Amino acid sequence: MSVPDHQPPVSPRTAPPPPVEPRRAAFRHRLRRDYPLILMTLPAVGLLVVFAYVPIAGNVIAFQFYSPYAGDGFFDSLANSAWTGMENFSRMLDDRDFWNAAQNTLLFSSLQLIFYFPVPIALALLLNSVLHRHVRAWTQAVLYLPHFFSWVLVVTVFQQLFGGAGLVAQLLRDWGWSDGFDLMTDPGFFKWLVTAQVMWKDAGWGIIVFLAALSTVNTELYESAAVDGAGRARRMWHVTLPALRPVVALLLVLQVGNMLTVGGEQYLIQRTAVGPGASEVLDTYVWHTGIQSGDFSYAAAIGIVKGVFSVALVLAANRVAHAMGEQGVYARR
């Protein structure tokens, strides 16, 4: 008696994989699906290419002794300018003003990273704990407002408070405590002054990202933690802060990568009061060297060095984020 052939059921693990859709078909499908979004982003991409990526080609002047008067127009002047190789880069090694600007930049960035970066997180946690929506909306509006002030107005406000003729100086003179109080012209205090200005101007605006991250936290987690007997502090430590951790890691990587760019307007306005030794940063040094002094090639070389080290800082900070189990700017492959 013959036994019919019996085919054992195919295990899901041994089942053949489904046919993979060809890449071209998948690309056409995504293109048909997302073409409205692509069209919306084209103007922004065009502006980015024209004003950010195309000018990168102008960095070739860092390897020349470029003079805008060497020809008619930029390209003619570029062709007639003499090539100097790495001379502009080697010049930085002996430039004391460059190293002073780099030292000030790192100092100001480090202070802002330590004192400014945690403030938006603390403000977001504080606002998130406010139950009354009207109080929260009013507080947010007050905190956001300084972000829209220009640096001229911000420095003016601080001048009226901490200058030689400001409110604090007048109160101290009335009380007979001091007759020479003027923090706005003190070079030694300048690093703390600019850090306080940044905190007052931008801390309120920085809480937007953290409030958005907090809004995604499932409220059932707080209820479960409360049922288990966790108080407010423990709920914040075990529920709220873990929800903020990926966002904090991402913004921290970006902040570290932006350490060599502290802006120029804030320092240019106060340069006369405290002197270039205390207020010169890389951005203002490039401005004075390239625009005011006309040394365009040397300024371009400083910009290239600054960009290379900024990329290195982003990569290093992102690797640290990966080591801590976070994605950072890009995921590990």
Image: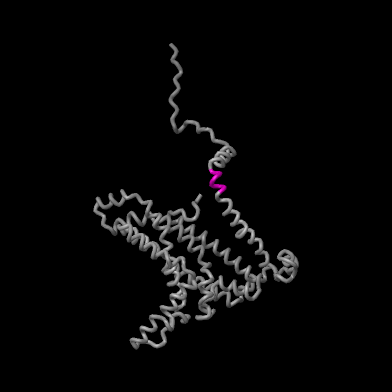
- Name the quadrant containing residue 6: top left
Measuring 42% from the left and 59% from the top, which residue is drawn there? 208
Task: Locate residue 277, reporting x and y percent.
Answer: 53, 79
Residue 35 shown in magenta: yes
Measuring 33% from the left and 86% from the top, which residue is drawn there? 175
Q: Is residue 218 above or below residue 307?
A: above
Task: Locate residue 131, reporting x and y percent.
Answer: 30, 57
Identify the colour scheme used. one colour
Q: Is residue 9 above or below residue 308?
A: above
- Name the quadrant containing residue 209: bottom left
- Name the quadrant containing residue 189: bottom left
Number of disc labels: 0
Q: Is residue 40 left or right of residue 184?
A: right
Q: Is residue 142 left or right of residue 42?
A: left
Q: Nearer the viewer, residue 287 or 72?
A: 72
Task: Locate residue 192, reporting x and y percent.
Answer: 44, 75
Image quadrant occupied by the N terminus: top left
Q: Nearer the viewer, residue 66 or 146?
A: 146
Q: What predominant SS class does the magenta segment belong to?
A: helix
Residue 191 shown in magenta: no
Q: Residue furthest top?
A: 1
Query: Which span is picked out in magenta?
Result: 34-39
Task: Locate residue 47, reporting x and y percent.
Answer: 59, 56
Q: Nearer the viewer, residue 159 or 303?
A: 159
